[in-house]
Amino acid sequence: MQAPFPDLSLVDAAPKGELPSYSSYRALLQYGSQSIHEKFKAGAPASTLIAMRSQLVDATIIHIWQRLVDEQLHSHIALVAVGGYGRRELLPHSDIDLLILVDQSDNTKINETISKLVTFLWDIGLQVGHSVRTTPECATEAIADVTVITNIMESRQLAGSPSLYENMLDATSSEKIWPPKAFFSAKIDEQKKRYAKFNNSAYRLEPNIKESPGGLRDIQTIAWVVKRYFGALDLRELVEHDFITTEEFSTLTKGQEHLWKVRYVLHHLTGREEDRLLFNLQRDIADTLGFSGEGNEAVEQFMQSYYRTIMEIERLNEMLIQLFQEALLFQQTPEKIVEFIPHFRTRNHYIEAAHDETFNEYPPALIEIFLVIAKNPEIEGVRAHTIRLIRESLPLINDHFRNDVRVTTMFMELLRQPHGLTHQLRRMNRYGVLAAYLPAFQNIVGRMQYDLFHVYTVDEHILMVLSHMRRFAVDAYKQELPLCSHIMAYIPRKDILYLACLFHDIAKGRKGDHSTLGAEDVKTFGKQHGLSTDDTHLISWLVKNHLLMSLTAQSKDISDPAVINQFALIVGSIKYLQHLYLLTCADIQGTNPTLWTSWKDNLLRELYLKTLNVLKRGLSNPVDKLEIIEHSKAVAMDMLEACSVSRQSVEHIWQNFGDDYFLRYQPDEICWQTQAVLKHHQLEIPLVVLRKETNRGCTEIFIYTKDSNSLFVATTTVIDNMGLNIVNARIITSQSGHTLDTFLVINEDGQPITEPFKLDEVRESLQKALENLGTLPVPMKRSTIRQLKSFGNQIKVSADNTTKPGLTALSVSALDQPGLLSHLARCLADENLRVHDALINTLGERVEDIFFVTDEKRHPITSSTQLQRIQEHIQRKLESMQN
């Protein structure tokens, strides 16, 4: 015989008339929770689990009520479950929302009883949220706040006076307040605001299962409207009223079941109410739900199933909201019908198929509909019945369809539309058309890469990149990235760039190099769509090389003419350079909102302009170092003389700086630093000066002092301790033995330091540390951020003596951790290495740093034994940091 649930014998043992102990009720809840989890492990559906949890809480609260509340008060008070508890949708750590109805608000005995009840519930471990109101107060609050009427609509009585509860329901019925039309409008407005909080996208690194677009709240919104409009208690009535099909209802309930199960596991793992699908828990959730595979396969499969689920819910929500709109808002409004081409018409500004057989009779209409919407911005959307027809017609999109010249012509025409392209491609993705038309796209729908660098799913990232590319062509956004907007204005075939956006990551998740595979996909597409050989080659080249410019800018010394000349040689022409620059900027912006910084903006612009100069001169006439040095000197001297600085004094100190200084610094930097050195007369004291913001998008720190092996360690430690990020370091030693060090830094949000007090604090801290190099500053202990704890630290240290003549390049790839740079600096100092240059690059959870070093005698490290010792030292240090 099956044991009763919950087992009230644990609390029924108390003498009659006495309230059982706290521990008895805690045991009841604990055993009940364990029973529910056993059901979960046995494979019970999530709907069973949440119903059992609600049953457990019901029984507990009612049991306490019966022993705590005097029977004489039962006719004056009613206990009501509201919100998720009212819906019987409780997860392990959901709040218990209660409404306590009273017939009078100033009854001392009732108030004392309520206080004891709520306190007791908290003491046994139930997280109770409660309100105490009379029926008139409920009506008043509900009129003022749609969330209150929503809670009341979901209510159910637990105990107390039935008449009080019935009176409250009557006072808040749709006949008296919030009629269906007004309620629907308020809920749609509420949903729009909720979507806006998530930038209208749920396809992010840590989505909110409950509140994000496509989340549980979308399903609840549908249920609320159905209940207010039909008085329905179950979403099945949507089928009965012909709002959705049986298949769509099944999709909706399966999606709800999946989200409930994920949310159950999330509560269980965190031990608290948590709705964010936290990055550091995603792997554990995947394991718990039975996903398996090598490396990140399991977690990526789990996240793809999650994102595909919410895409279905989003689509159904869109369709149902529109049907409700037609039933509630437009019911009394005369229909405005506009006939378009034979296959479509609009009804109240929503497009619909001319008849149910439109797509069967003319399959190209499956692409044509999106082209029509893009051409007619007054169209507000697609009618729900037509969305359903599109979904049902997806099997028509086969190889014959994809090779139909009518279809390929319309798709290319869509890409050339001046407005609406991004919206229509998003709509095509949501309805499943894009993945059907471009089979390679199917694999990336909902695919998340398990790292901190890519914060969107691959399909969402591609559409975000395309959206940023489109912004370059819109005058309203030209102040965001003026150079991009300027270049875009002179690109005659913008559709080439849009195709590069669509294909640049389309091969993610396939075995092999995604850039190479994507470039091959372009060739197939080009043949199908009648693109010229030149256009196909350009798009294919862009896809294959879409990471080239970013990697060159961030991992190579672009002050070196040889680097620029080599990059220009690969790019080959101004046309290819312009297209690659635009794709690179859009790609970085569409990868991660925090990734695009003023530093990266200026770094890429510098690489673009330098390469443009080389290409204008001709590849056979490259810029050489001497030419750059003489140009920098001449421009800087003109700037200094304009500031009334004597040429003689400038030439005197420049004699000590060496040619490398003028090669690696811009004229404005040379001018600023020269003035600072000339004004600095106490050479025994380190000179530290800061420029708040330079044209490189960073705060620039310049240090002029006697050279020391401890200098780099002290400087990086101070800067790191102050929460600043070093993005570039240039270290040059003058012939007089003084070092000219420049550190470009940004704050944690990727911007230059703007507060005067912070600039003073940085300068003073550095000054103090550099004056006391005998006692190095200690790296500040800081906690590793939550998401980083999900990664193993795969450390790679390599050395190369061919990157820069006379220098050894030490490359370090490791998990980003607080204090990492200062610890690396100490390793280099321990090995008696001098740092001459440093390129600091953070890619999500990993750093890719390169240090250009020599030994104490300024010679590169050529001994394989010494290089191996250095690499092992760094490896040990980083491993100890992790442990």
Image (spheres, grey):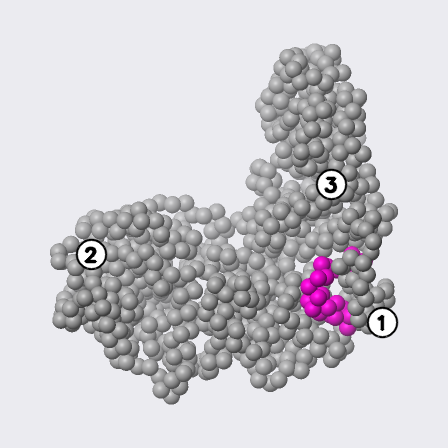
User: Is residue 121 part of the magenta span, yes or no?
Assistant: no
Q: Is residue 109 left or right of residue 773?
A: right
Query: Residue at coordinates 76% horizontally, 31% vertically from top-left?
Result: 172
Residue 839 location (% of width, % of height): 35, 64
Task: Tell me the kind of residue under disc 2.
Answer: Leu
Badge 3 amino acid: Phe
The residue nearer to you, when weighing 601 against 33, is 601
Disc 1 element = helix
Label 2: element kind: strand
| Residues tagged 3 and 1 counted as in contact (Cβ below 8 A) | no
Q: Nearer the viewer, mark 3 or mark 2?
A: 3
Sequence-first disc among 1 and 2? 1
- Magenta range: 364-387
Q: Nearer the viewer, mark 3 or mark 1?
A: 3
Locate the N terminus and report the quarter of the image it occupies: top right
Q: Secondary structure at mark 3?
A: helix
Vertical order, 355 against 181 (above or below): below
Locate residue 99, reporting x and y percent. Answer: 68, 27
Q: What residue is pinned by disc 2?
A: 687
The relative height of residue 717 versus residue 663 in the rendered view (above or below) is above
Q: CA distance from mark 3 to mark 2?
A: 67 Å
Residue in the picture at 36% in, 64% down: 696
Looking at the rendered structure, which numbered label has been put on residue 361?
Answer: 1
* Residue 835 in sight here: no
Query: Residue 527's quadrant in the figure?
Result: bottom right
Callout 2: 10 Å neighbours few (<14), some, many (20+)? many
Q: Is residue 716 left or right of residue 182?
A: left
Name the residue tied to disc 3: 183
